[in-house]
Amino acid sequence: MIRRRVVVSGTVQGVFFRDTCRRTAEARGVAGWVRNVRDGSVEAVFEGDPESVQKLVEWAHQGPPAAVVDAVSVTEEEPEGLPGFEVR
């Protein structure tokens, strides 16, 4: 199991980024959370098997169709064993 924290910048709020992220994570069996940040970015944590987490990180570089992603920061963290995926 691995864990990655991503911060996505650009036009990523108000475009269903969080809900689409949740549905994509649940479909891949990835645990974690996603939330809007006051600066206009979106922050998310993905935990799960390496392949599935990597697919979510790759997805974050594009996001849902209405998103315009300018930058993605990815940080490696220690897994916490989160039970599911939530929108915060």
Image: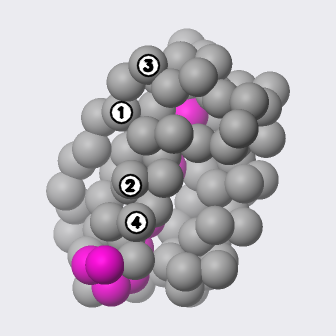
- Identify residue for label 1: 72
Lower position in the chain sequence, tag 1 or tag 4: 4
- Identify residue for label 4: 55
Q: Say whether residue 76 is magenta.
A: no
In space, the residues marked 1 and 4 are separated at their CA atoms by: 14 Å
Q: Is residue 6 left or right of residue 63?
A: left
Q: Given contact means CB atoms under 8 Å apart, are the residues at marks 3 and 2 in contact?
A: no
Residue 23 in view of the camera: yes
Q: Nearer the viewer, residue 44 or 58?
A: 58
- Identify residue for label 2: 57
In space, the residues marked 1 and 2 are separated at their CA atoms by: 9 Å
Question: Helix, strand or loop at disc 2?
Answer: helix
Q: Is residue 71 left or right of residue 32?
A: left
Residue 80 in view of the camera: no
User: Which residue is at a point 59% across and 51% down the rendered structure image?
Assistant: 34
Q: Given contact means CB atoms under 8 Å apart, are the residues at marks 2 and 4 in contact?
A: yes
Q: Given contact means CB atoms under 8 Å apart, are the residues at marks 1 and 2 in contact?
A: yes
Lower position in the chain sequence, tag 4 or tag 3: 4
Q: Which residues are magenta?
A: 42-51
Question: Helix, strand or loop at disc 1?
Answer: strand
- Identify residue for label 3: 70
Residue 81's x, y, as percent?
A: 40, 84
Q: Say whether residue 43 is magenta.
A: yes
